[in-house]
Amino acid sequence: MFAVLAVCESPRATQQPAPDPTPAPRGPATFLKGQLHLHSNNSGDSRTPPDEVARWYAAHGYDFIVFTDHNRVTDTADVGDMLVLPGMEITMNVDDCDPPPEGPLCPLHVNALAIDLHAPAPSVPSPADHRRDTLYRHGIALARSLGAIAQINHPNFHYAVDAALLATLAGEGPLLVEIANEAIDSNNAGDARHPSTEAIWDDALRRGAVVWGTATDDAHHYADAEAVRAAGELAFEGDRGWVMVRADRDADAIAAALLRGDFYATNGALLDEVGCAATGLHVVPSDRRARIECIDAAGVRAPGSDGLTCALGDRFVRARVHDRAGRTAWTQPCFSAPRAGADAG
C-alpha cells in the first residue's frame, strides 16, 4: 500500500525550491498550461503507456504534465516543447480509518508532484495509526522526502477530507488541494450532507490556512475512451481541468510557482492577468464579458467599480470567473496579512 517503485526513463533533477513569501506579481503574464493528475498503465487501472499519454497531452496544447501513477514514480521523455515531470499518487486505500469511512473503504490520496529523481531513498516512518490526519501526514511527508510538492487529491471522493483536517494539514507547509478534480466520481459539488470542495477550501482559508486550489483531470483513458464507454465502463478522460502557471518553461521555475501560488485553476475559462496588489486581487479575464465573483470570509460579492478588482476583506479574497461558454477559472487567494510558516499568494 505504501510501496514506492521507480520507473525512470529520462531522469532529471527537480529540487523543491524554498517558499517565496511575496505575493504573485501583477501585470501581463505568460502562463503555462499544466496537468497535475494523470495516469498511465503504470497505475494498473489505465491501459495507455506513458509515452502515448505524453503525446496525447502534447497534442492538446499542454506545456507541462506530471505523471501521478499509483504508488509508482513514472518519468518519460519530454515531447517537443512539452515538459514531462516525474510524480506519483501516494495511494493509501485502507479498510478502516478514524473518523470511519461512509462506505467500504478509506481512499486517502496525496500527489507527489515534480519528484527529484536524485533524492535519497525516503526514510519516512510508517503511519502509527489509521487516523486520517496520521495517514495524510504520512503521505505528505513521503512526498516531501522525495523533493516533491504535496497535493491533497479529490477531498470529496468518499468524503475523505473536511475543512478542519485540510486546515490542520496546511499548517505544516505549502500545500495544494484539488478543488476541481474533473473525474466523473469526484463529487466536487458535495450533497445535502457534505459541502462542495470549494466550500471546504473556503472554510480552511477562514481558519487561517494557506492552501492553493487546483483543477485536474485524474485521467485514465485517452484514445481508448470511446472503447471504454462502448464496453459499458466509465471513461475518465483528459483535458477537462488544469492549471495555468506563471513561470518560465523550466521544471524548477514551475515547481517554485506552484509552491507560492502563482497560478490559477480552470476547466477552460482563461485569464490575461491575475495577481495580488495593494488594492486587492486584480483579475482580467480573456473573455472581457466574463462574470467575476469575489469570494472572501463573508461570502460572495461583486468586484469593485472597475469590475476587475476584488477588495481585500477579512482574512482573504479570491475570485471565481465564469466565461460566456459556461467555463470557470479559480484564482488563488490574496491574504489580508501574511500567514506564519506559509506563502502569501
Image: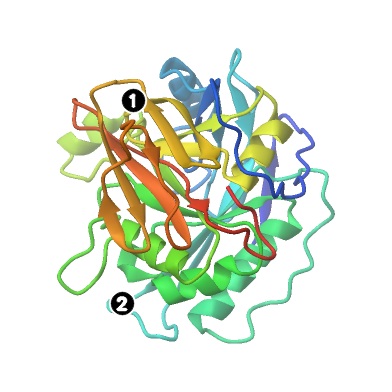
Amino acid of disc 1: Ala
Q: Is residue 30 visible?
A: yes
From the viewer's perspective, tell me whether residue 213 is left or right of residue 254. left
From the viewer's perspective, tell me whether residue 28 is left or right of residue 322. right
Identify the residue at image location x=76%, y=33%: 11
**Mark 1 to mark 2 CA distance (whole Å):** 32 Å
Mark 1, other Cα within 10 Å: few <14 / some 14–19 / many ≥20: few
Q: Residue furthest top?
A: 80
In this view, the residue in front, 49 or 216, is: 216
Element class at badge 1: loop
Amino acid of disc 2: Pro
Residue 123: x %, y % from top left? 79, 67
Residue where numbered disc 2 is placed = 104
Mark 2, other Cα within 10 Å: few <14 / some 14–19 / many ≥20: few
Residue where numbered disc 1 is placed = 223
- Residue 217 placement: quadrant: top left
